[in-house]
Amino acid sequence: MGTTEAVVTVAPELRMFLRRGRRAERIAVACDGVSSLGHVVESLGVPRTEVGGLVVNGQPETARYRPSGGDIVQVRAVPRPQPLATARFLLDVHLGALARRLRLLGVDAAYANDADDDRLIAQANAEKRVLLTQDRGLLCRRKLWAGAFVHGARPDDQLRDVLDRFAPPLAPWTRCTRCNGRLRPVAKPLVEPLLEPGTRRTYQEFAQCQACGQVYWRGAHAARLTAIVDGASGAASRAGSEP
């Protein structure tokens, strides 16, 4: 290897992002004296949002560092749980089921099924939300202030990944799963005109979204939803008790 190359080692949990043909444990990269270390890492396929630290020759460095020939670079993953100033999220169009699960747990999760990439970035930046996506290219957009790749193909796996990464505070049954608005208890007579006859006969306790007016009660899906809430709450409790 010539002196115009640096050696990059990527954390095992980040190697899935490496471009085809660059997935060796140690990767030789050319140093042109101009490109920043952040640019080099992104050129390998790792989104900047997934990088938790950069170490060069045993010393921490920033993404602005310009690597030189002979440098030994370590790319570390984001620590879990990842600290957040505010646990507010925005999900891309492919993560609607995950958005509903997060809202069920009381997590502030904005979502629209027709938002394009530019709109997502603008909303995430304006509202200071962490953009959750499985689009690696979107996470590499320079204008995006904060984002995270969501692991897992099934919504339940995706939920576990997000809760493990961010450990957001949970407040189950307090948000509307349809629009993300806040729920409040409501007297049955106030919502009776909105209910089907069977629901009026069978249920007595209701909540209503303060934003869109959707009415909620513990109906046929209660057991399945309760299982999701209990599983997430149990996992959060166990994580909080670990040393």
Image (tube, rainbow, N blue to C red):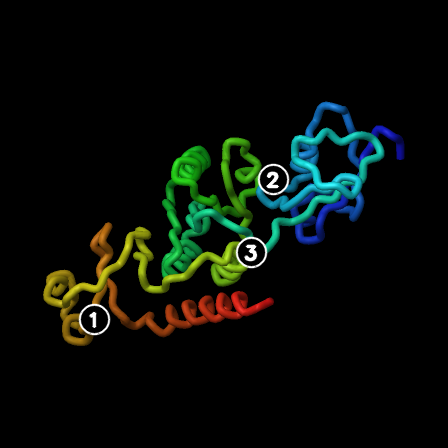
Q: Quadrant of the C terminus?
A: bottom right
Nearer the N terminus, badge 2 or badge 3? 2
Q: Quadrant of the N terminus?
A: top right
Identify which residue is drawn at 54% across, 34% down. Answer: 141
Tell me the SS state at disc 2. Answer: helix
Tell me the SS state at disc 1. Answer: loop
Cα separation, mark 1 vs mark 3, equals 36 Å
Against 242, residue 49 (above or below) is above
Against 18, residue 99 (above or below) is below
- Nearer mark to the viewer, of 2 and 3: 3
Provide the residue designation for mark 2. Answer: 48
Any mark on residue 113, and which?
none
Identify which residue is drawn at 24% across, 50% down. Answer: 211
Cα separation, mark 2 vs mark 3, equals 17 Å
Dot 1: within a 10 Å radius of its alpha carbon, few (fewer than 14), some, or many (20 or more) residues? few
Provide the residue designation for mark 1. Answer: 205
Q: Position of residue 64 (x, y in %)?
A: 66, 31
Query: Residue 191's image quarter?
Result: bottom left
Cα separation, mark 2 vs mark 1, equals 47 Å
Tell me the SS state at disc 3. Answer: loop
What amino acid is at disc 2? Arg
Nearer the N terminus, badge 1 or badge 3? 3
